[in-house]
Amino acid sequence: VLHASAVAIQGEAVVFIGHKRWGKSTMAATLHARGHSLIADDVFALDIHHHHPVRVQPAFPQIKLWPDAVTSMGKQPEELPRLAAQLEKRSHLLSSGFMANVLPLKYIYVLGQGDEMSIVPLSGQETIQYLLQNSYVMRFGQELLQERGATHFQQLTMLAQKVPLFRLLRPAGLELLPNVATLVEEHHLANEG
């Protein structure tokens, strides 16, 4: 289970991972607005086996967005309910554009900030590091990790071997989201097959 957001692009899942408030949900919402179906936001499960491609299990038709991201999507934050009374983050329930089918996982993008937009492959060591950091098991502390540590690490290693990870760098401004979405779409199309 990863702490990430995922969308479907031409029948394949692409996933966004990164630190809190780095734009995982915002990237998913931007791509959803461009006609790509949401698979999951915030958390989802992967089906990892030796004998078939890694597959993404769909989660819920909801995107969780901070007010500035809601505004960048052309909506008013007040139009969407808060996730909790004391939290500004909003719940955007989708009435359409949700992928309920299991899909093969094509790419994982690690979000980061840079002066220019770029997509660059990660090394093997970086791949394991980012997968471990964004694994949902890490949210529940060392006790659960000790209990399932060896199996969990084997799953992450298999995931790293089967699915390419890329660093997706972009400037911090939300006004460039359409350009970043185009970069992701073009990267996917350029590497089909």
Image (cartoon, rainbow, N blue to C red):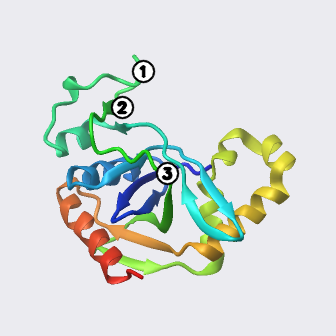
Residue type at tag 3: Ala
Q: Quadrant of residue 85?
A: top left
Residue type at tag 1: Ala
> Which residue bears the numbered disc 1?
84
Q: Nearer the viewer, mark 2 or mark 3?
A: 3
Q: Quadrant of residue 123?
A: bottom right
Q: Residue at x 50, y 64 (%)?
A: 105
Q: CA distance from mark 3 to mark 1?
A: 20 Å
From the top left corner, tell me how far across and down residue 58 is, in percent.
49, 46
Q: Residue at x 27, y 76 (%)?
A: 186
> Which mark is first along the chain, 3 or 2?
3
Q: Which mark is residue 4?
A: 3
Q: Residue at x 18, y 44 (%)?
A: 73
Contact? badges 2 and 1 (CB < 8 Å): yes
> Which residue bears the numbered disc 2?
89
Q: Which mark is residue 53?
A: none
